[in-house]
Image (cartoon, rainbow, N blue to C red):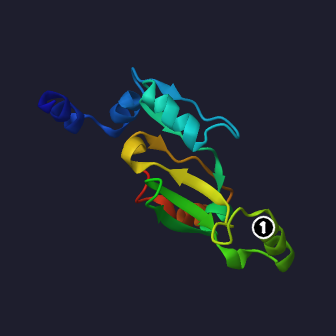
Amino acid sequence: ILLILNKMATMNIQEKADNLYKDVEILAPMVRASTTPLRILALKYGADTVYTEEIIDRSIIECERVENKALGTVDYLRKIDNYSKKQLKKLYKNATSKHNIRPVILRLVPEIERGKLVFQLGTGNSNLALQAAQLVERDVD
């Protein structure tokens, strides 16, 4: 391991980038498929790297980070104040619990995904991309 670390320390940035995905198994990003259950399953079957579903910058920025102790996850939940009265009425009507009405925009399992997860961000604005990246940076390596 020390030999590998020494070799990595002497590599230039291009060599490091070239080796980043060399000889690894990757669960490729897929629209509406790279959800938490599929990512965890892929890691359990030997994937080295998994991608989140693509999250649009404005969507994640409007979220609150919540540690879900019951599931051992980090959830990004949409904030209630971002909904109209009509949307809230619909959310309450469809909710299984009055305490659990906010949609989960992104769910991460740090114990399993740490060091193996790529956060896929959709953006068209560098300022919004920066805000979104800063929001999730402590949960995504």
Whole-percent x and y of residue 68?
A: 48, 61
Residue 93 visible somewhere in the drawing:
yes
Q: Looking at the picture, does residue 43 appear above or below residue 77?
A: above
Circle 1 — which element? Answer: helix
Q: x, y percentage for residue 140?
A: 44, 51
Q: Position of residue 96 (x, y in %)?
A: 71, 62
Q: What amino acid type should be assigned to the residue bearing mark 1? A: Leu
Specify the quadrant of the image occupied by residue 78: bottom right
Would residue 134 be seen by someone viewing this image from the given angle?
A: no
Instruction: Quadrant for residue 126, please give it.
Output: bottom right
Return the residue found at the far top: 23
Task: From the top left corner, tell me how far across and down residue 123 is, in percent.
Answer: 66, 55
Which residue appears at 69% of the width and 67% of the height?
Answer: 101
Q: What residue is drawn where x is 65% and y is 35%?
A: 30
Does residue 10 appear left or right of residue 130 in this picture?
Answer: left
**Mark 1: few/some/many CA within 10 Å (<14, 14-19, 20+):** some
Q: Which residue is mark 1?
A: 91
Q: Residue at x 64, y 52 (%)?
A: 55
Q: Residue at x 76, y 74 (%)?
A: 83
Q: Quadrant of the N terminus?
A: top left
